[in-house]
Image (cartoon, rainbow, N blue to C red):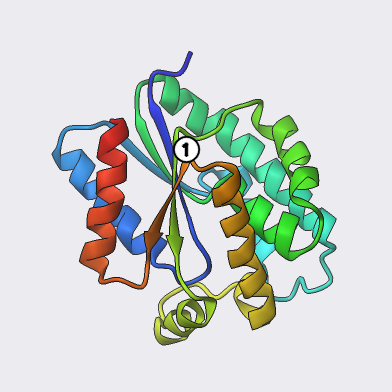
């Protein structure tokens, strides 16, 4: 049985996840918690290689089911190679994206079906769900404008989708919030960075 705590951070493009995650990790480390910061897709070499294929801007011909399967494959390797051992060692894991991204992006926005994509991922994760998921909610137009202003940020294939696609992603997340209200906690990401950090930390401290 895992001894650590698995926490995931979700949100649309440009929600500011990376900034807040870095702040949270630094804060928890100062408090003495054994923290592991990671991301999806990625976190380990094999999953990072899959990430390059998924997010490459030139891969516009990628079929939605192929995309969903690649995310699940990267997720499986990441869990087995990095997350599960860290949990067993008692770490607090802060992961940038997890299964909810697949459900919102491929399941809802791509139209594959939330339950269908969930089934693919059940095979991949073997019931290893997060104890807490923090969702940073923001209007997609605001999020995408942040990306355009932040020149140092990686611009990937999903960033180049239509505004209609990103609106569907947000709607998909909101459906997941209704489906998993005990696990998913919502934070208004249009607030100041300090306010978002404070709100996120409150949710995390409640389960630690």
Taking the image as drawn, is residue 112 in sight?
Answer: yes
Q: Residue at x 26, y 57 (%)?
A: 197
Q: Is residue 102 above or below residue 4?
A: below
Q: Residue at x 70, y 43 (%)?
A: 72
Dot 1 falls on a residue whose secondary structure is loop
Q: Is residue 149 above or below residue 125?
A: below
- How packed mark 1 is, by other alpha carbons closer than 10 Å (few <14, some 14-19, many 20 or more), is few
Taking the image as drawn, is residue 41 in sight?
Answer: no
Q: Which residue is mark 1?
A: 182
Number of marks drawn: 1
Q: Quadrant of residue 4?
A: top left
Q: Is residue 147 above or below residue 184?
A: below
Residue 117 x %, y %: 76, 46
Image quarter where the C terminus lies is top left
Q: Residue at x 25, y 71 (%)?
A: 192
Residue 123 x %, y %: 74, 31
Q: Quadrant of residue 150?
A: bottom left
Q: Residue at x 27, y 35 (%)?
A: 206
Residue 183 x %, y %: 48, 39
Residue 21 x %, y %: 34, 54
């Amino acid at each position: 049985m895992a001894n650590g705590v698995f926490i995931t951070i979700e949100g649309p493009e440009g929600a500011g996840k990376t900034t807040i995650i870095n702040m949270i990790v630094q804060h928890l480390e100062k408090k003495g918690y054994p923290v592991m910061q990671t991301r999806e897709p990625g976190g380990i070499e094999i999953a990072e290689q899959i990430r390059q294929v998924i997010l490459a801007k030139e891969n516009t011909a990628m079929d939605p089911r192929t995309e969903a399967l690649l995310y699940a494959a990267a997720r499986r390797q990441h869990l087995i190679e990095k997350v599960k051992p860290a949990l067993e060692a008692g770490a607090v894991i802060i992961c940038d994206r997890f299964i909810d991204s697949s459900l919102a992006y491929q399941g809802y926005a791509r139209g594959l079906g939330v339950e269908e994509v969930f089934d693919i991922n059940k095979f991949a994760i073997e019931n290893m769900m997060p104890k807490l998921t923090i969702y940073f909610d923001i209007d997609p137009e605001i999020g995408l404008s942040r990306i355009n202003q932040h020149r140092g940020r990686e611009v990937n294939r999903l960033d180049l989708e239509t505004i209609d696609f990103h609106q569907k992603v947000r709607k998909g997340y909101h459906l997941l919030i209704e489906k998993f209200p005990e696990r998913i906690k919502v934070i208004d990401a249009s607030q100041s960075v300090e306010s978002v950090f404070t709100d996120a930390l409150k949710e995390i401290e409640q389960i630690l």
